[in-house]
Image: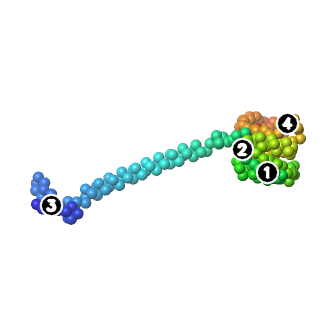
């Protein structure tokens, strides 16, 4: 019997069985069955991969939702280099904000942003730089998270530069009305310095 090229095999092949020659069986039938099983396994695998991906996405979301303070630095830990000679206070604020993650907050009418200062520091902590500026301007600097609050220093015995940590605190009590003596028990969480 001559060997045939598998690509040229006809769609019908006669197979011999115990009782003689069986009816014509399509060669595509075993391939269709194999194709069906493969397709079913791919679908199941795809579903499982989607479930795993969604589970990982959920876990990442939970982890990233944490308010974490791991990356937060104090003004003692941040180093800056500045070269300001007879420049306005406003320019000092802009340069520090551009070189660090801190933002200055102040009330415009309480500060003279045009007063000139001289700061020539190379790789010094921001704390030391603020102390030097405080001596020139008589200002008080208070770091709260990424903000540095600036106000005039009216109490000369008070520290010129402070670092304040915010803490969550739970407050419990009873809320009452003027008209009604019965109150409502309540609990609140507040962030306090």
Q: Are marks 1 and 2 in contact (CB under 8 Å)?
A: no
The answer for how far apart the CA atoms under marks 1 and 3 are is: 92 Å
Q: Secondary structure at mark 4?
A: loop
Q: Which percent across, then down, holds residue 156?
A: 88, 38
Dot 3 or dot 4, earlier in sequence: 3
- 87 lies left or right of 189: right
As drawn, the label of residue 84 is 1
**In the rendered image, which quarter is residue 74 located in?**
top right
Classify 60 as above or below 24.
Answer: above
Classify 22 as above or below 172.
Answer: below
Q: Residue at x 82, y 39 (%)?
A: 160
The answer for how far apart the CA atoms under marks 1 and 2 are is: 14 Å
The answer for how far apart the CA atoms under marks 3 and 4 are is: 102 Å
* Residue at mark 4: 158
* Residue at mark 3: 3
Dot 1 or dot 2, earlier in sequence: 1
Nearer to me, 191 or 103: 103
Dot 2 or dot 4, earlier in sequence: 2
Q: Secondary structure at mark 2?
A: strand
* Residue at mark 2: 123
Q: Secondary structure at mark 1?
A: strand
- 79 lies left or right of 24: right
Nearer to me, 92 or 185: 92
Which of discs 3 and 4 lies nearer the camera? The answer is 4
Q: Are marks 2 and 4 in contact (CB under 8 Å)?
A: no
- Quarter holding the C terminus? top right
Q: Residue at x 85, y 42 (%)?
A: 135
């Amino acid at each position: 019997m001559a060997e045939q090229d598998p690509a040229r095999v006809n769609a019908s092949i006669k197979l011999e069985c115990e009782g003689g020659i069986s009816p014509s069986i399509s060669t595509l039938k075993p391939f269709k069955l194999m194709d069906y099983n493969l397709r079913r396994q791919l679908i199941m695998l795809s579903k499982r991969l989607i479930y795993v991906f969604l589970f990982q996405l959920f876990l990442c979301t939970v982890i990233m939702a944490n308010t974490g303070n791991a990356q937060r630095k104090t003004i003692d830990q941040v180093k800056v280099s500045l070269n300001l000679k007879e420049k306005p206070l406003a320019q000092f604020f802009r340069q520090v904000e551009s070189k660090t993650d801190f933002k200055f907050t102040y009330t415009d009418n309480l500060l003279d942003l045009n007063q000139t200062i001289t700061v020539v520091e190379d790789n010094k902590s921001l704390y030391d730089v603020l102390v030097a500026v405080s001596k020139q301007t008589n200002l008080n600097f208070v770091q709260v998270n990424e903000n540095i609050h600036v106000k005039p220093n009216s109490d000369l015995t008070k520290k010129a530069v402070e670092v304040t940590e915010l803490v969550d605190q739970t407050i419990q009590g009873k809320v009452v009305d003027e008209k009604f003596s019965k109150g409502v028990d309540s609990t609140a969480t507040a962030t306090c310095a």
